[in-house]
Image (tube, rainbow, N blue to C red):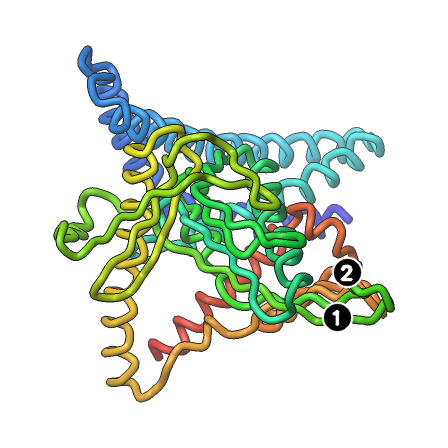
Amino acid sequence: MAADFSVVLDELDTTLKSIEAVLDIDRLRREAAELEEQAAAPDLWNDVEAAQALTSKLSHLQGDIRRVEELRSRLDDVGLMHEMAAEENDDATIAETERELESLRKAIDELEVRTLLSGEYDSREALVTIRSEAGGVDAADFAEMLMRMYVRWAERHKYPVEVYDVSYAEEAGIKSATFAVKVPYAYGTLSVEQGTHRLVRISPFDNQGRRQTSFAGVEVLPVVEQTDHVDIPENEIRVDVFRSSGPGGQSVNTTDSAVRMTHIPTGIVVSCQNEKSQIQNRAAALRVLQARLLVVRQAEQRAEMDALKGEGSSWGNQMRSYVLHPYQMVKDLRTETESGNPSNVLDGDIDTFIEAGIRWRKQQEAVGAS
């Protein structure tokens, strides 16, 4: 067992050194120091939105540095502790170090996945839209289940979520919803969730208790930043205001504060109704529209590249099945990752699927580049 422990310890040490090199911890410390200096400026909060963005970036940068340093410290400590326990034949401590090593293996694997997020927009916050597709009321219910799954996933990680818009279906569930996960690297992390999700179950809406297959689509966009230069001329936008509504069509406020924004050249329509004022909703809708147009621009560039390669992308295809009857299983159709506990998955326990998706995408990119 001691030999096995030593082998695993050496493997984890090598992996962590590789992570430290990729993340460039010294560079991160320099960036954090610069941000700390900016955060100390007396006029920082004159621009509240910029101040919040800066302090959030600093907080997550400090968290990244602390996470790597703590893993390094724990790895060094567990090696020494195991060595001393082996010399003294202390079986209880040896067992404790083996449990700690397994815990370290999981934590270092998670951190290694993060180093695979190196795409142009991977470090951005994420804008997630979920839409019900084929399957009627079951699809609307499934779309709401997926929204809850992603919000619960964010809560498990203590990531802030801001809901921009929910369009409720008449009988149950939602037609669509758009929300932001406001943490760095949320886009890179959640972008592997994009595609069509499929649910198989006994329909709670069918009085004959028949099995129903329904579908919902997940779209993940990077939140637009000032450096993106997504300028939209005023004459290309039509803005309509309406009264916000909740489940069953009930009005959630008494003013026409909700905003629907249409980009006339592309026909893209976005809406926002979560804020109290029309001005705030208009600003939020504009951010969503800019994110959509940024992705349209990306898609056009990618189409040009795909045309040169003579192939297209299949990432938007059906990517995961959630089977609740006749057996219980969630299966990712790209990575073959499975879980026999759909309840846990739908309650936000999706890290295993996300990590496998990120590794799969990196492999696809490597194959495409070769």
- Tag in front: 1 or 2: 2
Query: Residue 147: x percent and y percent?
Result: 58, 49
Residue 48 is left or right of residue 213, and the answer is: left
Query: Residue 332: x percent and y percent?
Result: 63, 67
Tell which circle, 1 or 2, labels the residue nearer the N-terminal end: 2
Looking at the rendered structure, the secondary structure element under dot 2 is loop
Q: Check whether the beta carbons of the residues at disc 1 and disc 2 lie within 8 A of each other.
A: yes
How packed mark 1 is, by other alpha carbons closer than 10 Å (few <14, some 14-19, many 20 or more), is some
**Residue type at the position of mark 2:** Phe
Q: Is residue 21 visible?
A: no
Residue placed under numbered mark 1 in the picture: 212
Closer to us: 213 or 79: 213
How packed mark 2 is, by other alpha carbons closer than 10 Å (few <14, some 14-19, many 20 or more), is some
Residue name at image x 30 percent, y 51 percent: 261
Looking at the rendered structure, the secondary structure element under dot 1 is strand
Residue placed under numbered mark 2 in the picture: 205
Query: Residue 291: x percent and y percent?
Result: 30, 53
Residue name at image x 68 percent, y 51 percent: 346
Measured in 3D between alpha carbons, the distance from the residue under mark 1 to the one under mark 2, in whole angstroms, is 10 Å
